[in-house]
């Protein structure tokens, strides 16, 4: 699967995870709306991030997006709000609660950068 996916709104989590979350909600006496489930499982890119990725020639394959989504899930589980996600030579600042990539940098732009206003970092293998 070497197809490159276009940046935009993508559903990345597995159906089993969605079903498990829905079961928890029902056990608690509350059902989630379709929009709540969709919002929780979609990786979004801000306009700024889309622009930066296009300028820097950053493209993401489906497998990469899945790994980034899993990293966001890990950060959320630890209570992170704004996280630095590093995958190979790509770094992204992600707003964890909204699952939105705020900006992205490639390897040539990583050198000498100081990342501020983040509360966590996740290094993805």
Image (tube, grey):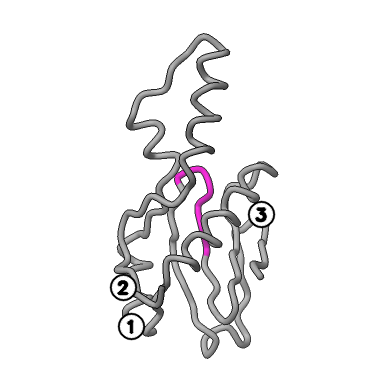
Please provide percent x and percent y for residue 33: 36, 24
From the viewer's side, name the closer residue of 67 and 40.
67
Quarter placement of the C terminus? bottom right
Please provide percent x and percent y for residue 19: 49, 30
Indicate left or right for 83 with 62 as reference. right
Which of the marked residues, 3 or 1, is nearer the chain's N terminus?
1
Tag 3, which secondary structure?
loop
Do the residues bearing badges 1 and 2 touch, measured as CB atoms within 8 Å? Answer: yes
- Residue to which mark 3 is pinned: 119
Which of the marked residues, 2 or 3, is nearer the chain's N terminus?
2
**Among all residues in the image, which is located at the extreme front?**
1
Task: Tell me the magenta residue range.
Answer: 93-98
Please say whether residue 94 is one of the residues in the magenta stretch: yes
27 in relation to 12, above or below: above
- Residue in the picture at 63% in, 47% down: 80
- Residue to which mark 1 is pinned: 55
Q: Which quadrant would residue 77 be assigned to in this image?
A: top right
* Residue 51: image tag: 2
Indicate left or right for 74 with 99 as reference. right
Please provide percent x and percent y for residue 104: 46, 72
Tag 2, which secondary structure?
helix
What separation in Å lies between label 2 and label 3 (alpha carbons)?
24 Å
106 in relation to 96, above or below: below
């Amino acid at each position: 699967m070497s197809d490159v996916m276009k940046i935009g709104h993508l559903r990345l989590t597995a159906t089993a995870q969605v079903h498990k979350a829905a079961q928890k909600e029902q056990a608690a006496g509350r059902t989630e709306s379709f929009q709540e489930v969709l919002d929780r499982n979609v990786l979004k890119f801000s306009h700024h991030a889309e622009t930066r990725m296009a300028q820097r020639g950053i493209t993401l394959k489906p497998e990469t997006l899945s790994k980034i989504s899993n990293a966001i899930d890990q950060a959320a589980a630890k209570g992170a709000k704004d996280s630095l996600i590093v995958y190979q030579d790509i770094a992204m600042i992600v707003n964890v609660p909204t699952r939105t990539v705020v900006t992205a940098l490639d390897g040539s732009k990583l050198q000498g950068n100081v990342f501020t206003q983040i509360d966590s970092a996740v290094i993805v293998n």
